[in-house]
Image: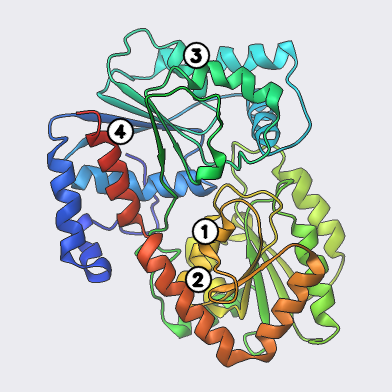
Amino acid sequence: MLKTAEERVPRLGDFSQVVGQQEIDSIRTLAEGLRGMSITEVNSTSYGGGVAEILRSMVPLIRDAGLDVRWEVIEGSFEFFSVTKKIHNALQGMNVELTDDERRIYLEYNKMNSERMQLDTDFVVVEDTQPTPMIDFHRTRRGKWVWRCHVDLSTPSIAVWNFLDEYINRYDAAVFSSEKYVIPTLKLPKVSIIPPSINPLSDKNREIPEDLVLKILERHGVKQDKPIITQVGRFDPWKDTTGAIDVYRMIKKEFPQVQLLLVASMANDDPEGWLYFEKTARHAGDDGDIHILTDLIGVKDLEVNAFQRASDVILQMSTREGFGLTVSEGLWKGVPVVGRNVGGIPLQVINGSTGFLVDTTSEAAEKTIYLLKNQEEAKKMGENGKEHVFRNFLITRLLRDHLRLLNGFT
């Protein structure tokens, strides 16, 4: 089991203070139906990005519910992760194809990982495309295999999808964040729609005192008495961090003291991260009110929590977004979100109620200015957003859906 050193990992019973004891009892009942069975969760990185974050919460909770679960992280070279990032981009709509050599690299590393891991458990849950072909190479497969897709599959590259399709169709079930991501060529026995969720008791989302928020702002040079807009997310082709800067510059014409925080972790399975970090930094120039904040300068979960709580508006300018946990994170702190009307963002942002859905940077600037000018309405939207997340996007709901899916095989 992997966990961070900075925080105590909450136990299942701790969540009763948030969601009530009845919800915890229902989870334990579902776990009881799987008693004696084993589960392996497989993904591509132990830190950085939403999948690792979810597993860091889910695995201890599944174990605390009395089940035998392990978390395996695949290994790979820079060239392997370059190929998997290319696959990720292709599935989200980028017009690229894989060369024969790239396919070879991808399959060879999956074969190597499959052979070195113990995957003879009752259930194997494979997260996203990096480890997808492992199912083809494991010699002692005996249990049910589930493929979990976290990317935006609304406009995939057909050539790349067709390459993956033959492996995905060997799974016993597939899970997507939204119905619009389900590809018609899938011929699996089970297809489930289970959106991701956040952990309300993690360092990133738990309640923290205001004086700690202010200390963190001061440490990173952010002025607490000036308007703050924040976007949290990786530096990659889809987050449109330069677009967020453009939004900020439009807002600055009306609110000259506004600050923009761009917050990210640099994941080890994302070789493109540094390229887009540099593009973002060049676009920002020497503007002292644009703060680029990463884990490389000590910005971890607690700092992200503080930045989101201090924000007046959360931006999510992604052009593709499988779900976007950072949207629910912002809403959970009672902050309205202005996000592009793409992928999983509309599941979280109810237009005009928990924030605004937009199509362009100019529209994003207009809606953010509106929220800065109408603080009472912004506060109400934030309250609506927190309630929406409470009802739909907390880790206990995800755990319940996950266990229910596995129970369906027994």
- Between disc 3 and disc 1, the foreground one is 1
Q: How crowded is mark 2: few (under 14 residues within 10 Å), some or many (20 or more)?
A: many
Element assignment for label 2: helix
In space, the residues marked 2 and 4 are separated at their CA atoms by: 31 Å
Q: Which sits earlier in the primary sequence, circle 2 or circle 1?
A: 2
Which residue type carries mark 4?
Answer: Arg
The answer to the question of whether label 3 and label 4 lie on touching residues, with beta carbons closer than 8 A, is: no
Viewer-proximal residue among 106 and 183: 183
Name the residue: 75% across, 15% down. 99
Name the residue: 77% across, 71% down. 363
* Left or right position of 148 against 343: left
Where's the N terminus, which quadrant?
A: top left
Q: How crowded is mark 4: few (under 14 residues within 10 Å), some or many (20 or more)?
A: many
Q: What residue sits right under mark 3 in the picture?
A: 112
Q: Which sits earlier in the primary sequence, circle 3 or circle 2?
A: 3
Which residue type carries mark 3?
Answer: Met
The answer to the question of whether label 4 and label 1 lie on touching residues, with beta carbons closer than 8 A, is: no
Instruction: State whether residue 221 appears in this view.
Output: no
Q: Which sits earlier in the primary sequence, circle 3 or circle 1?
A: 3
In space, the residues marked 3 and 1 are separated at their CA atoms by: 38 Å
Residue 331 disc label: 2
Q: What residue sits right under mark 1 in the picture?
A: 347
In space, the residues marked 4 and 1 are separated at their CA atoms by: 30 Å
Where's the C terminus, which quadrant?
A: top left
Q: Which sits earlier in the primary sequence, circle 2 or circle 4?
A: 4
Name the residue: 58% across, 41% down. 151
Vertical comparison of 127 with 189: above or below = below
In space, the residues marked 2 and 1 are separated at their CA atoms by: 12 Å
Q: What residue sits right under mark 4 in the picture?
A: 70
